[in-house]
Image (cartoon, rainbow, N blue to C red):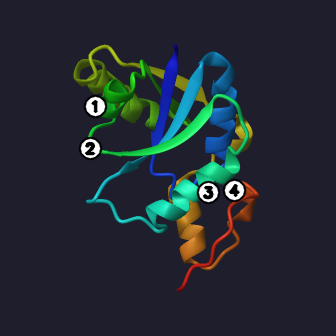
Amino acid sequence: MRIAVFPGSFDPITTGHVDLIRRAVPLFDKVIVAIGVNSQKQTLFPLDQRLGWLRKVFEGEAGIEVDFFENLTAHYCRRIGAQYLLRGLRNASDFDYEKTISQINQIVGGGLETIFLISQPAFSHVSSTIVREIIKGGGDASPFLPAEITFSVKT
């Protein structure tokens, strides 16, 4: 079985993430969208809320599962039997960063392959970081979020 993990903080999940995940589904038997929990990283939204959003967005979609993990992504992949990591690339900066991480994961993950998908032009400007800044600033982030995402933020 070809299992791919699409790891991220998904704080929040964006339309760009959703597009990449749905485009990857035909390539694998299963795509696991997994929130990496990093106790050193400050998130805007709690884990339970982010998991709930992912489950809502991908509800009823064959081939997509939602999960979370702590510690190294490569160790999580090994534990669940995933042979592939799925990553999206928006620009050359993403490539430089992701290339280094993929090479480390290849060693640490015992041959874990990273599959890169290029963002569609309509989503190449969308990032969780920018969306968080819009939300924190009181702006309307809805053009960058799946319709299933609803929240209120206290400022």
Which of the two discs, 4 and 3, labels the residue nearer the N terminus? Answer: 3
Select label 2 or label 4 by which is in front: 2
* Residue 53's disc number: 3
**Alpha-carbon span between mark 3 and mark 1:** 25 Å
Q: Are marks 2 and 1 in contact (CB under 8 Å)?
A: yes
Q: Residues within 10 Å of mark 2 (few under 14, many from 20)?
A: few
**Alpha-carbon span between mark 4 and mark 3:** 14 Å
Front-most of residues 140 and 32: 32
Q: Quadrant of residue 147?
A: bottom right
Name the residue beneath numbered marker 1: 75
Name the residue beneath numbered marker 4: 144
Please say if 141 is above or below 65: below
**Disc 3 on helix, strand or loop?**
helix
**Disc 1 on helix, strand or loop?**
helix
Which of the two discs, 3 and 1, labels the residue nearer the N terminus? Answer: 3
Q: Are marks 2 and 3 in contact (CB under 8 Å)?
A: no
**Disc 4 on helix, strand or loop?**
helix
Q: Residues within 10 Å of mark 4 (few under 14, many from 20)?
A: some
Q: Quadrant of residue 47?
A: bottom left
Tell me what residue is drawn at x 72 percent, y 54 percent: 146
Furthest-left residue in this view: 108
Which of the two discs, 2 and 3, labels the residue nearer the N terminus? Answer: 3
Please say if 16 is above or below 42: above
Name the residue beneath numbered marker 2: 71
**Alpha-carbon span between mark 2 and mark 3:** 22 Å
Q: x and y percent of residue 33 in the render?
A: 53, 39
Q: Are marks 4 and 3 in contact (CB under 8 Å)?
A: no
Indicate the amino acid at tag 2.
Answer: Asn
**Alpha-carbon span between mark 1 and mark 4:** 31 Å
